Image (cartoon, rainbow, N blue to C red):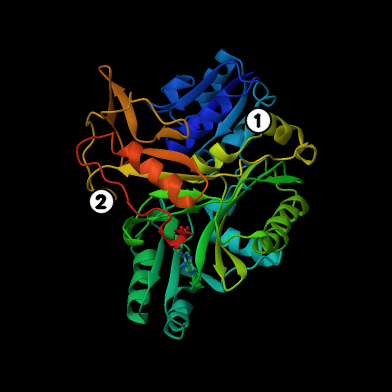
Amino acid sequence: MNILLLGSGGREHALAWKLAQSKQCDQLFIAPGNAGTLQYGTNVNLSITDFEAIKKFVLEKGISLLVVGPEEPLVKGVTDFFRQDEQLKQVAVIGPSQYGAQLEGSKAFAKKFMIRHGIPTAAYREFDESNYEEGIPYLQQHALPIVLKADGLAAGKGVLICQSHVEAIAEYELMLHHSKFGDASKKVVVEAFLDGIELSVFALTDGKDYVLLPEAKDYKRIGMGDTGLNTGGMGAVSPVPFADAAFMKKVVEKVVEPTIRGLEKEAIDYKGFVFFGLIKVGDEPFVIEYNCRMGDPETEVVMPRLKTDLVELFVATDKGQLNTIKIEQDARYACTVMAVSGGYPGSYEKGFVIDGLNNPLPADSLVFHAGTTQKNGDVVTSGGRVLTVTSYGNTVSSAVVKSREVLQHISFEGMYYRQDIGFEFE
Ligand code: AMP
Ligand code: GLY
C-alpha cells in the first residue's frame, strides 16, 4: 500500500525507517520530511495543516494509510476531515479524532477525563476569566511548589513550576490577563507538584483494545545532570530500568486500562497512539500528561526495539483488530543521544553543513535526522535538534557509549550533545 507520513522530526525518520521495512509498504511519502527520511521514501513539500492540499495529494498518489506524527494536525481535526470526506473515508488514519486529541490539546479536558475514570493524577483546579478572582486565594494557600499549566498547546512551554506564591500569582496573571501563551493560556490548570521520576509509556489503540509498546525515559534538560533549560528532548533510553514488572503491572492496571476503557465507554473515536507522561512517586504511577502521538526522541528508541511489523499494526488498528496482535520486542537496550545546534533551546543559526554522515556505521547504531535538509548536495542543519544516534547494547551505558562514539565522527558548527544520557543507570 502507499503510505503518507506527516511530520519532519527524528520521530518521523524513525517511523519512516520502520514503515519502510514492511513488505506491505509500497510507496512511502513523508510530508515535509527531512534529509534522513529521503532514504526511505519521497519527501513532499506539503503543509501538515493544509488538509485540502493533503487530500489532493492522497487522491493523486492512491494513499491508503495516513500516519500522523505530530499533534498539531490531530488537534486541528485532520482525522475528522478524512472521516467526513466521501473520497477519503476509506483511508486508514493513525491518529485520534479532534475530540480525542483533546487529551493532549486541552489539559483541563485531560484532567476531567482522568477524574471521571479514576486515573491517578495530581490534585488540581482550573481557572479562566469567569473564576479568575477565586484563583488568587487558592494560589495563596497552595503548597509549594505550584504547577501552572496553560490549557492549550504551547509548543511544550506551557508548564511553569513556581517556587513561591508571589511568582505563582504573577505568572497566573500573565497567563490569564496578558496572554503569556496566547489563546492557550485563556484557561489555566493549577496542580499539585509531584516529586518523583518520570517515564513515558506508549499504547497503540483502536479505541477498544490496545498494544503496549516499549516504554522509554527521555532527558529534557539541555545540561549535564539534568540541569538548565527544558528542550524537546536530548536523549532517551528504553527499557527503563526502574520500570520493573511489578511497576509496569500497576501502570497497566491503574493507568493504561482505565484510559482505554474510558475512551471506549465515552465512544471517543481514537485510533492511534496514547503517550502516557508518567511520574513514579514512591512505587505509584501518576499521569502528568497525555499526548495523542508518539514522543520525540522516545520514538527513536521505541521503534528500534519494536520487532513487530508497523504497517501490520496500523492496519489492525484501523480495522479494530488489535486484540489479534502480540507485540515482539528486542530485549536489548536502545539509547539515543541527540545532537543540537549551538544556542538551542534559545536562538540558534541554521544552514551549517553536517560532515561525517557518510561514515560507515557500526552494525548496532542508527542515525535519525531531525532538523536537517538537503542543500546543493550537502546535508545542512535546519532546526534546533539536528540528529540523534541510537545504539543497541546489553546495558544502558554500553549503548550510550556507542552512540557517543558515532557522534564523535559527525560534526557541524556549534554542535552540542549531552555526554551523560542514561547517567543514573550506570
Ligand atoms: P508537560 O508539558 O505536561 O509534559 O509538563 C512538562 C514537565 O513539567 C513535565 O515533564 C514534568 O517534568 C513537569 N511537570 C508537569 N506537571 C507536574 C507535576 N504535577 N508535578 C511535577 N512536575 C510536573
Ligand atoms: N519527548 C517528549 C515529547 O515528545 O513530548
Residue 163, image quadrant: bottom left
Residue 393 position (above or below residue 56):
below
Residue 309: assigned label: 1
Q: Is residue 71 visible?
A: no
Q: Residue at x 38, y 55 (%)?
A: 182
Viewer-closest of 170 and 143: 143
Residue 384 at x, y percent in the picture: 31, 42
Residue 284 at x, y percent in the picture: 62, 70
Residue 347 at x, y percent in the picture: 23, 47
Residue 181: assigned label: none
Assign a secondary structure to mark 1: loop
Viewer-closest of 272 and 409: 409
Query: Which residue matches tag 2?
Result: 346
Assign a secondary structure to mark 2: loop
Q: CA distance from mark 1 to mark 2?
A: 38 Å
336 vs 125, left or right, is left
Q: Is residue 6 visible?
A: yes
Q: Residue at x 59, y 66 (%)?
A: 286
392 vs 160, left or right, is right
Amino acid bearing label 2: Gly
Which one is in front in this view, the residue at disc 1 or the one at disc 2?
1
Structural crowding at the residue carrying mark 1, measured as other residues with C-alpha within 10 Å and reported as few (<14), some (14–19) or many (≥20): some
Residues tagged 1 and 2 counted as in contact (Cβ below 8 A): no
Q: Is mark 1 within 8 Å of ligand 2?
A: no
Q: Indicate the quadrant containing the C terminus: top left, top right, bottom left or bottom right.
A: bottom left
Q: Is mark 2 within 8 Å of ligand 1?
A: no
Residue 226 at x, y percent in the picture: 36, 61
Amino acid bearing label 1: Asp
Viewer-closest of 46 and 339: 339
Q: Indicate the quadrant containing the N terminus: top left, top right, bottom left or bottom right.
A: top right
362 vs 64, left or right, is left
Q: Residue at x 38, y 56 (%)?
A: 157
